[in-house]
Image (cartoon, rainbow, N blue to C red):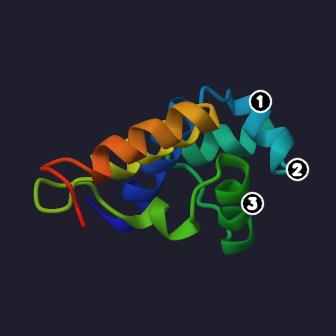
Amino acid sequence: MNLKQVCVKNLKKFRKQQEISQIELAKLCATSLNYIAEIETGRRFPSLKLIEKLGQALDIAPFRFFIEETKENPTELDDLINLLAKLPDQQRLKIIHRITHIGGNHG
């Protein structure tokens, strides 16, 4: 997969994970729905400025649009971190505490 294809695939993935429509994303990025649709179908490619806006709108570091998920480079951990970030503070802290104490007491 080339870099453009990776970016397009990740944009769609991150947008759908956050349950944001193309219309909402276009509004958040001050661009048109048609432009977002053309990007997601691979007909156009966003500028670096728009990639930064897309990252802000989706709460994703812009470089993540260019990371290809493979068996050697899975991004499931990132997906779990994003889900964890959406939980209420108390629930998130409880889960983090459990994770950091797996395998017994630490000190």
Q: Can you identify the residue that label 3 sits on?
A: 53
Q: Amino acid at mark 3?
A: Lys
Q: Residues within 10 Å of mark 1 (few under 14, many from 20)?
A: some
- Callout 3 touching callout 2 (CB < 8 Å): yes
Look at the image and tell me in which quarter the N terminus lies. Answer: bottom left
Along the line of sight, which residue is nearer the eye, 90 or 57? 90
Q: Can you identify the residue that label 1 sits on?
A: 23
| Extreme-front residue of the structure | 107
Element class at badge 3: helix
Element class at badge 1: helix
Evaluate whether residue 12 shows in this view: no
Look at the image and tell me in which quarter the C terminus lies. Answer: bottom left
The residues tagged by marks 3 and 2 sit, at their Cα atoms, a distance apart of 9 Å
Evaluate whether residue 51 shows in this view: yes
Which dot marks residue 30? 2
106 up-or-down from 69: above or below: below
